[in-house]
Image: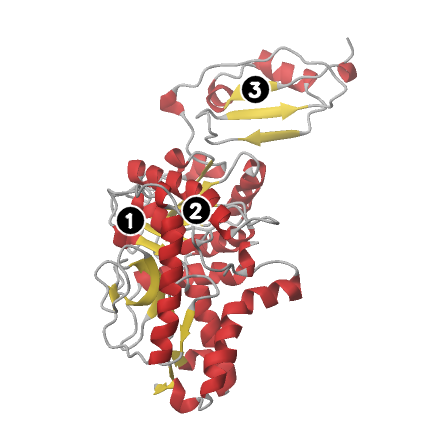
Amino acid sequence: MSVSAAMAVAELSHSFTKTHLHSSQVSFKSTRLVNYRRCAFRPFPQIRSTTISCSVATTEVKAPVIEQAEDPKNKSECFGVFCLTYDLKAEEETKTWKKLINVAVSGAAGMISNHLLFKLASGEVFGPDQPIALKLLGSERSFHALEGVAMELEDSLFPLLREVSIGINPYDVFQDVEWALLIGAKPRGPGMERADLLDINGQIFAEQGRALNAVASRNVKVIVVGNPCNTNALICLKNAPKIPAKNFHALTRLDENRAKCQLALKAGVFYDKVSNVTIWGNHSTTQVPDFLNARINGMPVIEVIKHRKWLEVEFTEKVQKRGGVLIKKWGRSSAASTAVSIADAIRSLVTPTPEGDWFSAGVYTKGNPYGIAEDIVFSMPCRSKGDGDYEFVNNVIFDDYLLERITKTEAELLAEKRCVAHLIGEGVAFCDIPEDTMLPGEM
């Protein structure tokens, strides 16, 4: 049979190609696979084996398959160049470098991650003296794209990026991680109710919570980005009882950044003059951008912007609907600004909060000083000493307007909690969400 009429599909384990590929087998590859299109290096797929798959034109017939069982001791847990170069020996460490940290990112082949991963690898987030290992979680459908992301990270030559591993099994990817950035989630499709989205994504985050509970560092910090992020964070923490509930965060930093931008525009100042901005409650259209406690150049916003109706109506709606306006303009949801806000959220935990200021984060409400219902994840003002932990802010003020809005977003989160009762060990789910408050980015 001619070469052009033959089809070969060879499955070669990574350890086989590195240590057992003899000259006769090299000859086989060069003569029988002349038309192969693609070779995909899979560091640890779901079946816990690493393979190189080479495929040829579909008009050809199959040739014999060469297989060899992989020794678990030799299982690859790295990608490409990182398998060869990661060797942080004592004599190679600079005296100023910190201990390597392990950071997992789910949805790692998506647009948000495409911006975020390079910020993490560059040292922009954790600091210029912090070596990092990136553990990237994808799906079967996105695995080739995940390989492409890893290749780009290789080609970027980041000195601090000491290790990259990719996979589709959270129990592999989350092993010993100290940070877990959970971005991946199913988007809301046409005709899908918010309750449906809560259930579908809730199952994803329940499984990821169980994986973190089983294999992650006991003090892992978890930031949930996939929507609906507040309740997804609650589901995740409820399925990870060995990890402190305080370590779970829902991302509301993008909402805070948008609020700062709008206040700065209205006041005619640069946004670095805006401080003490809080987003209260849910990452939904019930969220409450707090102008009462916010400051511009150290002065209360209400003394700088003396247009109360603008603050209560236009400002609030601009923050809540900013994502939808962006989608109409650009045809896609925010990715780069979301990645920036994730980086901001991490930096707020690993660097001390400036004196007198605070930041917003969706956190577990147990022990909060604001009277918010306990046992939900609610965005509130926080401060940090830079140790990865946070504390609630005490010196905030409330008026009737703010309390009324906070009560509404609290009620929504309590309704969402009832809707996912089956995922958090609280019996049969009952969905009574009063209205659809989906943000455009959920679509």
Labels 2, 3: front one: 2
Q: Which residue is mark 2?
A: 105
Give x and y (percent) for residue 20.
49, 16
Label 2 amino acid?
Val
At horizontal 78% and vertical 12% (from top left) the residue drawn is 2
Cα–Cα gap, marks 3 and 1: 37 Å
Q: Residues within 10 Å of mark 1 (few under 14, many from 20)?
A: few
Q: Earlier in the sequence, mark 2 or mark 3?
A: 3
Mark 2 surroundings: few (<14), some (14-19) or many (≥20) residues within 10 A: many
Amino acid type shown at disc 3: Glu
Q: Nearer the viewer, residue 345 or 381?
A: 381
Tag 3: Cα neighbours inside 10 Å, few (<14), some, or many (≥20)?
some
Q: Is residue 101 visible?
A: no
Observer-nearest of 228 and 260: 228
Q: Which quadrant of the view contains residue 331?
A: bottom right
Spot occupied by residue 51 in the image (x, y as percentages of width and height): 52, 25
- Residue matched to label 3: 11
Residue linked to disc 1? 99
Question: Which residue is found at the position 54% from the left and 58% from the top?
Answer: 441
